[in-house]
């Protein structure tokens, strides 16, 4: 995430390092995430990243991008996360 911030950030000040994001309940487990805020093409963005472990030992990285409104997540962010969580197909763990 820090590397991504360094590549994407286009503001005058360096992007802040990632911080923990709220834990999401995915596939009957709590999955920690990372949050990265940066300026990209003049807009304040917030990226959320979640790495979901898979039963076969692998994982899937989910990355969400939201353009902040007055420093706060957009109205569409929670709806998007809810829609994604409700459509996520989980295999046996």
Image: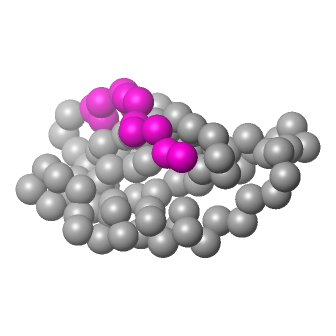
**Which residue is found at the position 63% from the left and 41% from the top?**
29
Return the residue nearer the eye: 24 or 66.
24
Does the magenta-highlighted stretch encompass residue 17? yes
Q: Residue 18 location in percent, x, y?
A: 40, 31
Q: Is residue 13 in view?
A: yes
Task: Tell me which corner region of the image, top left, top right, bottom left or bottom right, holds residue 53.
Answer: top right
**Which residue is found at the position 65% from the left and 47% from the top?**
28
Q: Which residues are magenta?
A: 14-25
- Quadrant in which the C terminus appears: top right
**Which residue is found at the position 49% from the left and 45% from the top?**
24
In the rendered image, the residue lying farthest to the right is 56
Left of 72 or right of it: where is 87? Answer: right
Return the residue nearer the eye: 21 or 46.
21
Q: Residue 70 location in percent, x, y?
A: 9, 56
Return the residue nearer the eye: 31 or 46.
31
Q: Is residue 7 in view?
A: no
């Amino acid at each position: 995430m820090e590397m991504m911030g360094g590549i994407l950030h286009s503001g005058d000040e360096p992007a802040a390092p990632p911080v923990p994001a709220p834990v999401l309940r995915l596939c009957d487990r709590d999955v920690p995430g990372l949050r990265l805020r940066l300026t990209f093409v003049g807009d304040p963005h917030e990226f959320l990243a979640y790495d979901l472990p898979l039963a076969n030992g692998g994982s899937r990285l989910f990355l969400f991008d939201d353009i902040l409104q007055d420093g706060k997540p957009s109205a569409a962010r929670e709806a998007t996360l809810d829609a994604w969580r409700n459509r996520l197909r989980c295999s046996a763990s």
